[in-house]
Every structure is written in structure tokens, then in C-alpha cells.
Amino acid sequence: MQLAGMQLSDELFMPLEKEQMDIKKTSEPGLTYWRDVWRRLKKNKVAMVSLGIIILIFALSIIGPLLSPYSYSDQLRGQEKQWPSWQHPMGTDSLGRDMLVRVLYGGRISLSIGIVASLINIVIGVLYGGISGYVGGKVDSIMMRICDIIYSIPLMLYVILLTVVLKPSLTSLFELPLFSAFKSAGAGLISIYIAIGISYWIVTARIVRGQILSLKEQEYITAAKALGAGGPRILLRHLIPNCIGPIIVTTMLQIPDAIFTESFLSFVGLGVDAPVPSWGGLASDAVGGIRSYFYLLLFPSLAISITMLVFNLFGDGLRNALDPRIRK
Amino acid sequence: MAQYLVKRFAYSVLTLFIIITITFFLSHAIPGGVYTTEKPLPQSIVNNIKAKYGLDKPLFQQYLIQLNNIVHLDFGMSMVNEGRRVNDIIAQHFPKSALLGSFSILLCLILGIPLGILSALKRDRWQDNVSMIIATIGVTVPSFVVATLTQYFISVRLKWLPVMGFTSFKHMVLPAVALSFFPLAFIARLVRSNMVEVLEQDYIRTARAKGLSRGVVVFKHALKNSIMPVITYLGMLIATILTGSFVIEKIFNIPGLGRFYVESISNRDYTTIMGITVFYAAFLILMNFVVDVVYVLIDPRIKLKQ
């Protein structure tokens, strides 16, 4: 047989053996959605480096204070206000406390604020946006109008007010035996969790609503309805899991915002209770003595800035990996 | 248009009403009060103080009185600063915050927009990379860090500018830079991404094809559409600058309203908290209202639904 001058042997046109006919073996294994996302994410060097740094920051904050010979509240007499040295790599503060362990421990506090506050935001936002989008009609327009109203209020004013209100109320609440378990966490910290957590859910609610509005018209929802699934089941089992991508991205971007908000609160004197450190609190304490003890401000500020940077970069990378359409 | 204005205005009033209500009940939920001192005062004095400020009345009645006063634009007397009316406090301190704020906004716009345009025009070249690195640093470094660092190096070390206070233009430079750092970076990124998008549109190609120079196309055709989103961002920009002023005014020792607000909260000065919150909220709502109206007026692509 000849084709365009090529010599093709007849063997090529013989039927295949039975075991060679398995199509599954010849094609690549199928990729699940998350594997595909991970593959795209791996190609993005900036996002991967950021992810590495995020893991490192978490590891240092969790393990670091355990390895240090000092605790965050140990006051070393005679070693006050020391510049960085081998013994104290980040120096000591005016009470002789080792700054390295304080910055690492502050990382725990700041990261926990970032995570807890964003989780509260996400839960509220997802439920609110989900209900609004799924129910639709009048309910939707009223719920979205409420969102518009909240959105036009300067939220920082309310986070400040809420913190002021919550802190003493929680302090007295934790005196009760029922809630004494929370006492060790400190009323200041918990009031910050709540104040930030219940303030910044509007963005998530809007994003989730938009997603649900388009998803609920799809055939599989009609199928679920035909099978007799009720509203809450469709919303929780079918619709919300399909919005998981945007939800994760907003969470990632809310974590640094919450850390930033906490540092802001510390700066106006509404942070966690002394002697517990947070990055914002450490930076705020350092401002008074900046002329002589510059390093006290440097390390906590670096910690905040680097954390904000890597979370933002990773969040951007994740968004691109989850939705390849918006890549440019 | 008239219908739209009326509707928007009604919403603004409703928003303001909700804000007043929330603020009132929140600030009264703060345990303790002006009569809380380190040494407990005798009950008779506490009662007198309560009577003086109307705190002995039922909460709901206090709320109605407060509402009525606000409708008449009277925020009452400060509970902590003896003999000062909240209106006077606002009138005296807000102009300083406003001056600093306007200067910061100006700074954001005259630096942020060109930075974004430059980036978009030199896309993926070194100019773009440098300005986007600056913009990324801008959104990640907190304003109080910028403020303390510049204060230390430029004022204390180099002695180029005064360290604190608020008496001349020189005093305003560093606080304004610190305040505008974040929004400036945000605007640069916003303008860049919009400019990049607009430059790929058909009407830009048409303009180039009919022989217009690149400069004319960029500055007459593309620019208008790519700075549109900056106008919608203006409302939030004002809010950012306003809340930012809380810490910046503290660091630079500026006698503005932001510092007063923070102090009034820790002093449980109800009337001042109420007054300043309502004032700030009303101010921001008004600004958002103006921005929305301006946006509808200048962007013909927006058709209002009848």
C-alpha cells in the first residue's frame, strides 16, 4: 500500500489483539477538578513560594515558642532593651522580654485571629448569600438591600464599637462557671474574633449569591428537585459545594485583612490583653521608643507585612488556578 | 434621573437611621459609664450625674430624645470634656482631619493614576514590574508602619520635615504620605488592569486604524474609560482615609477628629461617640451619594432602570 509516496506495511491495517483494545489503558488517567487545580497552581512559582512561606510562618509560630528557653511573659532582670544579639536574635523589650519568642507567640495570636475571624465571616456570608440567591425574588432583593446598607457603613467604626462593648461583657460572662473554659483565652482576644468575624461578611455573601443565582438554573438542580430534595438539602449539598472555589479564595484574602484589622485595633488601644503579644500590639508598643529602639518596631512590622504579602499573592494564585478563564 | 435621586436619597436616610439606632444601643451596652471612676463614687453623686445627662430615664426614652436631638443637628454636651458641646468638638477638629484627608486623596489621584497608566502602557516591561512591586508593597505594609518609619528616618534622622504637630504645610507631608500609601497602590493596580482591558477593545483599534497617534488614543480615548472605576472607588477611598486617620493622627500628634473619636470610646463619652459616629457615617453616606450621582452623570453606558 502506498500513500503520498510513503511505504506503509500491511501489518498496520491488521485488527488489534484483544488485550490491546482497552481504551482506558491508552488514554491518560482522568484528572479530578482538584488535581487539575493543583497542577495549575504548581506551575505558578509566585503562589508556590508564597504557600511555602505561609507554611513556614505557621510552623514557626506553632513550634517556635515551644523551643525557646524563654516564655513570652518572662521578664529577664538586667537584660532590658538589648539590641539583637545571639542570645536574643530580635533583642529584648523595655521589660526584658525576649522579642523573638514574643514575635513568634504573637504570630499564633495574629494568625488565629486571621483564621477564626475569616471562618466566622465565611459561615455568615455563605449562609446569607446562599439563602438570598436560592430563595430569590422579594427575599433576595430585601436581603441584598440590607447588604447595601451595611456596606455603606464604615465598618471600622463598628469593629471598634463592638470590641469596646464585647470586651467587658465577655469578661463578666467568663466569670460564670459555665463559660470559665474561655477565660484562659482572654476576653480581649475573643471579643476581637467576634467583632471582626461578624463585620466583614458582605463581600462573601455577594459572591456566593452571584454564584448560586447562576448555578440554581442548571439541570442537576432540577434533577435534585425532581427527586424530591428540599431547599436546605439542595442548598447545602448541591449548591454551596459547587461555589467552594470562590469561597476559598475570599477566605484566603480575608485572613490578611483580619490580621491587619487586629493590628489597627491594637494601635488604637483595643487589642488583646497584656502581656499576651500580637503583631499589631508589639508594633504599637514599639512606636513610643522608636528613636532609641528601632528594632522593636522592625520585627513585628516585617512579620505583618510579609504575612499580608504572601497571603495576598497565594490568594491571587489560587484564584487563577481555580478559574482558568480569568487568566491572562 | 429625578426618581433615581429620590430613591437614593431615601436609602441614605434609612441607612443613617439604622446607624443611629445601632450606635445608640451599642454604646449603651458598654458596661459602666462616665460615673465609673477608679474610686467608686457615692450613690448620690452617681444619681446626680445620671440625672444631669438623662441617663436615669428608660433606655427607649433616651433613644427618642437622642433621635430628636440629631434631627435638630444637636449632638448634645460631651460627657467627659466638661462644658464642650459635641458640635463644637466636631467643628473645631474635623477641619484639620478634612484638610489632611483632602491632601491625601489628591496625592492618591495624582500619583496613583499615572502610575497605573505607565504600568499598562509598558506592560510586562521593567517600568510595569517596578510600579507593580511598589503597588504590592503599598497594599501590604500597614499605614502605621509607613508612618513610624518615615517619621523616624525623614524627620528624626535627616531632620527634613517636622516630627509632629500640625501647624504648617510641611507638617502635613508625612501624615498624608502614610495615609495615602494603601489607596495609592490600590488605585494604581485598578487603573492598570482597566487600562490593559480597555486597550484591547475594538474602538481603540478603530481609533488607531483611522490614523490617530498613540498618545491621542491613550489620553483621549482609553483614559476616560479606564479611570471610571476609580470614581466608584472614591467612596471607599474616603472611608479608608478617614479610618486611617485614627492611628495616623495619634502617631503625628495631630489634633484631628479621628484621635478624638478613639479617645471618646475609651472614655465612654456616649454623646461624643454618638455624635462623631453619626457625623462620620452621614459624611460618608453623603460622599457615596455624590459619587453615585456623578458616576451616572458621566458614564453614558449606565442606563437607569425605570
Image: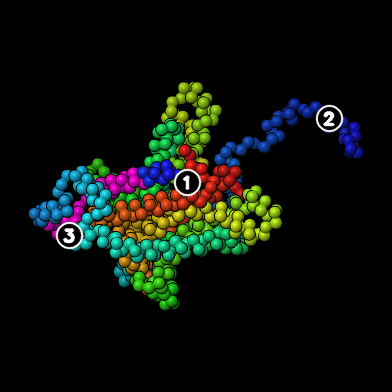
Q: Secondary structure at mark 1?
A: helix
Question: Residue B195: within the magenta?
Answer: no
Q: What's under tag 3, amino acid-wise?
A: Glu
Separation of disc 1 and disc 2 at Cα?
56 Å
Q: Is residue B17 magenta?
A: yes
Q: Nearer the viewer's eye, disc 2 or disc 3?
A: 3
Magenta span: predominant SS is: helix
Q: Label 2, secondary structure: give it.
A: helix
Q: Chain of mark 2?
A: A
* Residue carrying label 1: A250
**Quarter holding residue A12:** top right
In primary-sequence order, the first of circles 1 and 2 is 2
Q: Position of residue A236 (x, y in %)?
A: 44, 33
Residue at 56%, 52% (x, y): give it: B225
How many C-alpha atoms fall within 10 Å of the one at disc 2: few (<14), some, or many (≥20)? few
Of B220 and A96, the residue lying toward us = B220
Q: Residue furthest bottom?
A: B159
Relative to A292, does residue B37 appear above or below in the rendering? above
Q: Could you classify mark 3 by the number of other residues whose Cα lies within 10 Å: few (under 14), some (14-19), or many (20 or more)?
A: few
> Which residue, given by chain and number where applicable, does mark 2 sit on?
A13
Asked whether B24 or B38 is in front, the reply is B24
